[in-house]
Each structure stands twice: as C-alpha cells, then as structure tokens.
Image (cartoon, grey):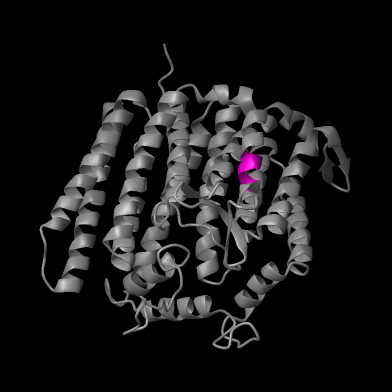
Amino acid sequence: MTRARNRELLGLLPASLLITAGFAGVFIQRSNQLSNVSLTYGAVFLGLCIAAHVFIRITLPHADPYIFPLVAVLACVGLVMVYRIDGATYARQQAQWFVLGLILFAATVIAFRDYRKLEHYRYVIVSISLFLLILPRIPGIGDEVNGAYLAVHIPGVINFQPTEFAKVGLVIFLASYLRDTRQVLVEGRRILGLTIPPLKHFGPVLLLWGIAMVILILLHDVGSSLMFYGGLLAVLYVATNRVSFVIVGLIAFGLGAWYLGTHIPHIDARVTAWLHPFTKSEYNAVGGSYQLANAQFAQAAGGLFGTGFGEALITVPGSHPAVYLIPAPSTDMIYAIIVDELGLFGSAALLLVYLMLVARGFKAAILAADSFSKLTAAGLSAILGLQVFVIVGGVTRVIPLTGVTLPFVSYGGSSILANFVLVALLLMISDRARRPVPS
C-alpha cells in the first residue's frame, strides 16, 4: 500500500516540472526572458496535486498508483497550451475548473464511498442522463454551435455541455443492467451462427441504439453518438463475450448513420467537409472546410520534431480583432496546434499518455471481483478512449470532425468536471479490486 502511494507521489513530480518548463517556454517565446512566475505556477500545481494525493492516500489507499499522475500530466499540457493560445484569462479559468474538478473528485469519493449502491438507482440515473441529453434542444437554453446542439447556455447563470455528464450515467446504467441480464442474453436462440437474445431482455440495449440515432437527429452530434454507442458495445462485449453482438451493433450503427447522414443536411455537410476539405463549394469560397484544411497544413508543418513551442501561426498576422487561421484552436483543434509545435513525436507522446490511462482503467476492470465493478470500469475506460479517438480522428481526417473535447487538455469546464468524476469512479473500483484478501 505504502509503496503504491509513494509511486503515485513520485509520478506527480514530472507533471509539475512539465508545467514549469511549459510556462517558461511561453515566457521566453513572448518576451525573450525567463520569469520566476513559471516556478510559482509549477509549485502551485504541485501543491494541488499533492493535496489530492494525500486525499487518495487516506481514502483510497489501495487504488491504482498511476491513474492520477497520468491525469496530472494531461492537465498540465492543457493549462500550458490554453495559456499559450488564448492568454492568461482563459488559462485562469482553466485552472479554476481544474481546482473545481479536484473538489468534485473528492466529493464523488466521499459521497459514493460504496459505489456499488449506484446499482439500486440505475433507472433514476438513466432518466437523469437522458434528460441531460435533450437539454440542448430545449428552446431558450439550448445553444447551437456550428449546426450542432452541444451546450446549455443561460446568460449570466450557467454554460455547460450536459453530454459530458450523461456519458458517465449511461455507463453506470449499462453496467448495472447487463450484470443482471448477461446470462439471458448469452443463452438466446442461435440463428445462422448468431445468438439472438430475447427481445424483452435486449430491449434496453436496442433503446440505447435508438438513443444514439436520436442524438444524431436532434443534436446533430456525430461524436457523442459514436462515443455513447461505442461504450455500449464495449460493455456488451465484456458482459457477454460475444463478438457477434459487436459486429451486428457496428452494422446497425453504420446503416443508421448512413441513412441519417444522407437525410440531415448538417451531418451530410460534415461528411462532405471530411472527404473534400480542400474543395471549393457553394458554402465556402475558400475551401470545403476552412477549419479542416488549415488543420492539415498545421500538422504537416510540424514534421517529426515540431516548429517549436509558440511558433505555430494561430491568427492572421496584423488582424484586429484576431482572425483565427484555425477556428476553435483551444477546444476542437487543440490537437492540431500540439502537432504543429511539438511534431509527430510530441503528439505521439501525448497519445501514449492517453493509452496508458485507458490501459490502467482496463487493468482495474480485470482485477475487479464483482461484475458491476468490472463492467463499469470497462465502460468508463472505453468511453474515455473513444472520446480521444473521436476528436483526434476528426482532426487528422480519419473520421468526420465532431465537437467533442480532448479530455483534460481542451479548454472547457464541463469536460474537466465530468472526467474527474470518471477518474474518481475508476480509482474507487481499483481500490476495492486491489485490497488484500483477509487471511
């Protein structure tokens, strides 16, 4: 126990050094001189992380020692990049959300110390999650951004993305439901080599497939739909060990996405921009997608080692007010800026941190003794990994670009808060799974 927590504490030191070096690089690039403020930022960040470490040491002594340091590394990359792109005001807000995220993290651990009790409230949780999903379409509070309904905005009161919190609730519901019905699903009828489960038990799974399609229709949000549905298939596969369910699920999603993509103009425009970002169109005289086209140029300019920290061109020189060459550089397109300045090696290192974080989440799922813990950890890890894939895949044109955030790195409070709840659940599951068996 003590060795694991000491490894966690040791892992926090590189994160504080990284944020110190990052801010030092920004100050040198801007004023050609080194400021002691970078040391202050590094010390404050390290102090916050140590406070969280002490809390974990007291409440979750057996938890995985690598999950929180990996999150700290991602958070410091996000703080430095947001400061470099948008300046001190946005970086200060990002830092405030990081502090609020740590507070919410602690509150989650305290409130749900025995997280398995969440099973008893699965229908309440899924109802709240579904309500959060439809909030952006409610007139007066729903906020449309670039054709997609992603946020709830009440001027002077609140502005957040409810889908970030809904993803956690839907995973908890799926884990609880499949824990009770997985055996029935496995023992369904065999037709042409495929297992056909009873409809009355498979109904909620079909309902979530419908939810993914409804998200496409109502919210015009391809990324959230893919993320939710991918999490569903991951939990379903872990629960039943049936590849056929995954294959049928992918085919069903593909058919639904194809049909909706050819009948909803916004989604069709996203696909067209993905396929032809450099082609002039009636919608954009500059190119099929100004955002995607410039993102490709920025990533190509980065090469293997990058153009250098602070050297990426983000705004049109001399423009007042600033005109962004890459729209939304600190949110949707922050990965393109990272590739431009840090190159292929720097961006690959960032993705490796995400891979290690997802791997530790799946390790917690493997070690978990009860089915609910195992399915919850697997689903949360899959959702996190899919979110990274969706945004990085969109920026690099592997899939159509959507408006999800890069966890802990992109500017945005909803993403940071929701992902800290996700991390809290993973650590609680890991702590229970790694406890020594009483003799």
Residue 166, image x, y percentages: 58, 43
Nearer to the camera, 261 or 206: 261
Task: Say which residue appears at 45% left-offset and 23% top-offset.
Answer: 113
Q: Residue at x 23, y 46 (%)?
A: 45
- Where, by quadrant of the figure, is residue 218 drawn? bottom right
Q: Is residue 143 above or below residue 34?
A: above
* Residue 384 horizontal side relative to residue 170, left or right: left
Q: Is residue 64 visible?
A: no
Mostly what secondary structure, the magenta segment?
A: helix
Q: Quadrant of residue 207?
A: top right
> Residue 131 in magenta?
yes
The image shows residue 15 at horizontal and vertical percentages of 26, 50
Foreground residue, 317 or 208? 317
Q: Quadrant of residue 68?
A: top left
Q: Position of residue 147 (x, y in %)?
A: 62, 66
Q: Which residues are magenta?
A: 129-133
- Residue 143 within the segment the image draws in magenta: no
